[in-house]
Image (cartoon, grey):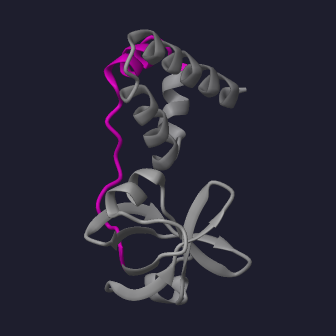
Amino acid sequence: MSAKKFSAELGSEGHALFFEVPFDVKQEFGKARPPVRVSVNGHSYRSTVSVYGGRYYLPVRREHREAAGLKQGDIIQVTVAPDTAARTVQTPPALSAALAKNSAAKAQWQKLSYTHKKEHADAIRLAKKPETRARRVQKTLQMLAAKAK
């Protein structure tokens, strides 16, 4: 399982930008939706391969597009390699404190995928105002409570 290099066109659907992976990911990396390390224009990021209609795709979030200077329609040079590093998320202090008081929410938090944990943690961590951060912590706790039902 070594890195694979290829050219791809950055396509879009709605607000999402992505590119197709032109090889059989399952055959090359051992599973259809493996965690991977993606490198484009000198910018690297972690992602997971998506499968739609028997074809493989990788998303390119806005933060990665901006860091790599990409836009829809660009032909990009891509390197994709298996990501074998542990996928852990640093829980923001405000959320950690709330989870410490709520064992059911903490149990649900532990069950979330890496991606979902990262999205919630980033939303909380990137809040500029304390009241926004508190609101996002509450929203996360509500989502966790709904999952527990």
- Of residue 141 and residue 136, the one placed in the foreground of this image is 136
- Residue 100 shown in magenta: yes
Viewer-nearest residue: 135 or 73: 73
Quadrant for the N terminus, please.
Answer: bottom left
Residue 108, image x, y percentages: 55, 31
Quadrant in which residue 56 is drawn: bottom right
Q: Is residue 26 magenta?
A: no
Question: Would you say residue 103 is visible in this rendering?
Answer: no
Above or below — where is 109 with respect to 20?
Answer: above
Q: Nearer the viewer, residue 87 or 62?
A: 62
Magenta range: 79-104
| Number of dots carrying numbers | 0
Q: Quadrant of residue 41?
A: bottom left
With respect to residue 28, does 76 lie above or below? above
Residue at 41%, 21% (x, y): give it: 95
Q: Position of residue 23 (x, y in %)?
A: 52, 90
Residue 21, compared with residue 122, is above or below; it is: below
Side (left or right) of 21 relative to 89? right
Tell me residue 139's x, y (percent).
Answer: 58, 21
Can residue 41 be seen from the camera position used here?
A: yes
55 lies left or right of 125: right
Question: Percent position (x, y) of residue 52?
Answer: 69, 73
10 or 81: nearer the eye? 10
Can you name the residue that lies furthest to the left here?
Answer: 42
